[in-house]
Image (tube, rainbow, N blue to C red):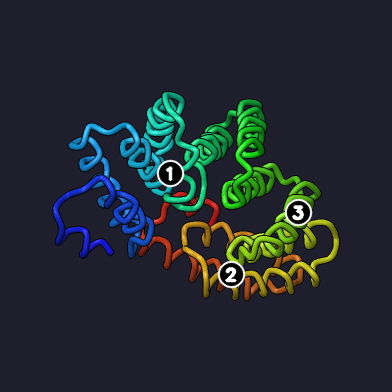
Amino acid sequence: GYELCRSLPESQDHFPVYWGWWRLSRNFTEMGKRADELLSRAQSHKDDALLLQAHHCQWASHFNRGDFEGSLRHVEEGLALYEQADYRSHATLYGNHDAKVCGLAERLLVYWLMGRPEEAMGIEQEARAWAQTLGHAGTWMHYMEASMIHRLYRRDAEEVLRVAEDMVSFADQQGLTDHRAKALIFGGWAHARLGNPSKGLSEMREGLERQKIIGTSEEFPVFYDMFAEVLALNGRIDEALEEVTAAQAEFERMGLRIWLPEL
């Protein structure tokens, strides 16, 4: 699709294709370069709708590199544009989720990681409220996923399990296999933390195997961090160490820095 668009006269209608080209970058160094190209294209068009989605790419790319200030800067610029017009329809064109909910979710995780837990909790509620107004399945799942990661960081296993179970149910209704696999991973961690490590390990293995087939890779470092913890809770220390060591090397190679401190 990208090559086809490049062979035609430049058009704003190509931008969703370029956004998908960014989303499927082969590694996270390349993803950053593609995000920069999308921002340059949007600036050349002087189009706020394209700029919004270029910032959408940028805040994710900076986050994946561990650049919290850069991520927040692009969230601020993108959300300022979002408030100037009605961009709710973008959820069907760009990543199957709403840009405002995504920006709030990114801010939520950055605030927690920067040691701003009270503000993070407030942003989670703001993201939830906006997602509920949209009635868009992919956006709702995007919010739930961010909420699960946030509660994982807070070590709130009961809330992680509650959200994961809701997510599995909703994913089954909507046929969203990617999100169902993620929910199994988080639910497995929660079961293990709440006293059922064997059930947790079984669910995590199932979720990871499905996610390897259907999912993108940016969250796999935190998945393997959780997996190692659950293996340890099952007394499988050597296997846990092997998984973490292999995961760390792989994500260093890919340029995915955000979760490397956890590993």
Residue shown at 46% from the left, 25% from the top:
83
Kindly report which numbered mark, 3 or 2, lies closer to the viewer in this rendering. 3
Q: According to the image, label 1 marks what residue?
A: 63
Residue shown at 43% from the left, 33% from the top:
75
Q: According to the image, label 3 marks what residue?
A: 166
Q: Which of the 4 quarters of the picture holds residue 239?
A: bottom right
Which element type, helix, strand or loop, lies under badge 1? helix
Amino acid type, mark 1 = Phe
Mark toward the start of the polypeptide (1 vs 3): 1
Q: Categorize mark 1 by other alpha carbons within 10 Å: few (<14), some (14-19), many (20+).
A: many
Amino acid type, mark 3 = Asp
Residue shown at 43% from the left, 27% from the top:
85
Give the distance between the C-alpha atoms of the residues marked 1 and 2, in whole angstroms: 26 Å
Mark toward the start of the polypeptide (1 vs 2): 1
- Residue furthest right as drawn: 195
Question: Residue 56 placed where, x, y %?
Answer: 40, 41
Q: In this view, does 20 lie above or below 51?
A: below
As drawn, the label of residue 241 is 2
Question: Residue 42 placed where, x, y %?
Answer: 25, 39
Which element type, helix, strand or loop, lies under badge 2? helix
Question: Residue 190 placed where, x, y %?
Answer: 76, 57
